[in-house]
């Protein structure tokens, strides 16, 4: 007669069926006398297998125990360890099998899947009893099906660092808080039976959103460069002296424009009208001062590389230039910028402050053929925030990791153009080249115990060539001169490889050795367009209003546009 038990916690067979067999077995074993046999009412679990309902990884060895219990006639049970006497089998030997004849109760996990472990125990004269329990074998995290490359990299790192932590630390050598927390997360993720939540955990704890460093660095450099190039364009159109956009100083008597303040300074330094006539005075026609403000917005849609983001930035660029003869100019420009990127997850982002300084020059080489050049260095300060939220073996993990670092960027541009005048219309074909190299220092996050990451130093490169066309129209009206303009540039990126960023768990005692996480971003489009359009209105007395919108078109999963608008006051010194 065979009695089967359900997986632990075992559910007893109804008393009316099981009790008689157990009582007869007890009598056969001499555990009960005739009177006790008639009076005993206690029902014991019978055959029990432990551990019950386990989840393990491939190559894990699971040691099972089997106990058999019967009523002792005194209201209790007598429990006997029958582990070595039981016969152990697996319903799916390819998933887990009993391979060692010296330890027949040791199951070796061989492949991902689920199997039923069964123990059979025979009592002479009473029959054979069986008990079973399921065993789930999870694949290594890095070998799970359907992972993105970045999820796979995080999984492979955990597959290495988690056993490493378990081997290093024990009761005699307890782990510090960071490794202890990571080890707890290891067990929670590795042994989670739900593959969907395991994959989601790999996305949440990985640093794929840090690929936004590249987008932010490139946008800062492009915004500053565009402002300086626009200044050189204005110079070729005849702009001179002071150029101030939308700036006033609040005083007790009301707002005063900076143009008025510079006029006062001009009179004080140059002695009024005689200063205007001095070509080489401190504020002469040869010296020009200018300022421009820009607001930009950008976004990137989610992809297999990251979760996407939304961002904005504000840039103020100011500078001065000195005319060398009538055909060329040299100048210095500086910009301050602030930007914020919000990750499209459950929060977090990248905040950046930047300072740029440039040396620039423009001149005509032959007739209407000109050259513009710029060399720039920028210093960036970054603050990162990662909000880590995921489910780990049924429990929600909610942590926030914060990091700070700095970076430096060198970039330069060289462009050539030729102005073709067609009455009031000027058409300018142009060609140029731009190069950028940025280095961002390594840093380590804090705040998310066990899940903090150490980010390697990263280098960002961009090498582009561009071909474009610009059109300017001078339109005289009764209110002033209206100057609409359009510009289109086709840009080819030579360094179009996908960005790679290395990192490791800060709690790894070996600093990521053999457990490096390699995050791969989306490759930039090899070719895209930069489109711009706007207009200015030149009134009397050097006052002009202007507006310009510029955007990137065909920039892959990302988009960026900026708007410049304001009142420009120009005065000559």
Image (spheres, rainbow, N blue to C red):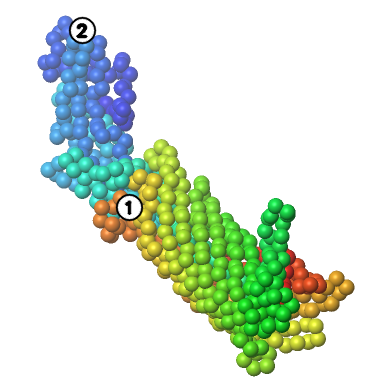
Give the alpha-carbon distance from disc 1 to disc 2, as whole Å: 67 Å
Mark nearest the camera among 1 and 2 is 1
How far across and how far down the image is residue 564, in percent? Answer: 67, 65
| Callout 1: SS | loop
Residue 38's mark?
A: 2
Residue 470's mark?
A: none
Please report the residue visible at 54 percent of the width from the left and 53 percent of the height from the top.
342
Q: Is residue 22 visible?
A: yes
Up/down of 342 relative to 544, above or below = above
How far across and how far down the image is residue 393, in percent? Answer: 38, 39
Q: 78 or 59, which is in the foreground? A: 59
Residue with the mark numbered 1: 506
> Badge 2: how crowded within 10 Å, few (<14), some, or many (20+)?
few
Please report the residue visible at 72 percent of the width from the left and 80 percent of the height from the top.
274
Q: Is residue 107 visible?
A: no
Up/down of 98 relative to 14, above or below = below
To which quarter of the image does residue 249 belong?
A: bottom right
Q: 408 or 139, which is in the foreground? A: 408
């Amino acid at each position: 007669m065979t009695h089967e038990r359900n997986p632990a916690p075992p559910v007893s067979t109804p008393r009316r069926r099981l009790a008689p067999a157990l009582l007869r077995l007890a009598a056969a074993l001499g555990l009960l006398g005739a009177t006790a046999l008639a009076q005993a009412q206690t029902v014991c679990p019978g055959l029990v297998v432990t551990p019950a309902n386990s989840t393990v990884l491939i190559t894990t060895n699971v040691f099972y125990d089997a106990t058999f219990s019967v009523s002792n006639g005194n209201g209790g049970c007598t429990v006997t360890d029958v582990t070595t006497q039981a016969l152990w089998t697996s319903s799916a030997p390819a998933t887990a099998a009993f391979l060692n004849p010296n330890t027949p109760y040791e199951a070796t996990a061989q492949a991902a899947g689920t199997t039923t472990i069964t123990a059979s125990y025979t009592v002479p004269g009473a029959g054979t009893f069986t008990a079973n329990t399921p065993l789930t074998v999870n694949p290594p995290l890095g070998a799970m099906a359907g992972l993105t490359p970045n999820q796979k990299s995080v999984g492979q790192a955990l597959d290495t660092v988690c056993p490493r932590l378990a081997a290093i630390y024990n009761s005699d050598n307890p782990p510090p808080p960071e490794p202890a927390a990571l080890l707890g997360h290891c067990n929670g993720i590795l042994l989670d039976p739900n593959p969907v939540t395991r994959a989601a955990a790999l996305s949440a704890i990985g640093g794929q959103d840090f690929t936004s460093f590249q987008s932010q660095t490139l946008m800062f450099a492009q915004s500053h460069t565009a402002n300086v190039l626009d200044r050189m364009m204005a110079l070729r159109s005849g702009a001179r002296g002071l150029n101030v956009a939308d700036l006033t100083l609040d005083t007790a008597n009301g707002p005063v424009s900076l143009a008025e303040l510079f006029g006062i300074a001009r009179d004080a330094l140059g002695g009024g009208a005689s200063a205007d006539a001095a070509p080489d005075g401190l504020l002469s026609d040869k010296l020009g001062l200018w300022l421009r403000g820009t607001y930009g917005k950008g976004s990137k849609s989610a992809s297999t590389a990251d979760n996407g983001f939304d961002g904005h930035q504000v840039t103020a660029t100011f500078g001065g230039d000195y005319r060398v003869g009538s055909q060329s100019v040299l100048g210095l420009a500086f910009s301050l910028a602030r930007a914020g990127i919000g990750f499209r997850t459950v929060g977090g982002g990248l905040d950046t402050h930047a300072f740029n300084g440039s040396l620039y020059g423009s001149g005509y080489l032959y007739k209407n053929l000109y050259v513009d050049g710029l060399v720039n260095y920028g210093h960036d300060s970054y603050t990162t925030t990662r909000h880590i939220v995921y489910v780990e073996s049924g429990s929600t993990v909610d942590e926030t990791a914060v990091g700070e670092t700095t970076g430096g960027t060198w970039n330069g541009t060289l462009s050539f153009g030729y102005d073709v005048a067609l009455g009031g219309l000027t058409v300018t074909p142009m060609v140029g080249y731009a190069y950028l190299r940025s280095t961002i220092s390594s840093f380590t996050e804090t705040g998310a115990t066990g899940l903090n990451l150490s980010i390697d130093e990263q280098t960002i490169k961009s090498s582009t060539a561009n071909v474009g066309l610009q059109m300017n129209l001078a339109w005289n009206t009764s209110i002033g001169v209206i100057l609409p303009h359009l510009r289109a540039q086709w840009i080819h990126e030579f360094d179009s490889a996908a960005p790679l960023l290395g990192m490791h768990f800060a709690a790894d005692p070996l600093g990521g050795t053999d457990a490096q996480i390699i995050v791969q971003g989306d490759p930039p489009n090899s070719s895209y367009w930069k489109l711009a359009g706007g207009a200015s209105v030149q009134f009397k007395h050097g006052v002009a209003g202007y507006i310009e919108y510029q955007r990137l078109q065909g920039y892959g999963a990302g988009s960026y546009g900026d708007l410049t608008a304001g009142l420009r006051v120009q005065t000559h010194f």
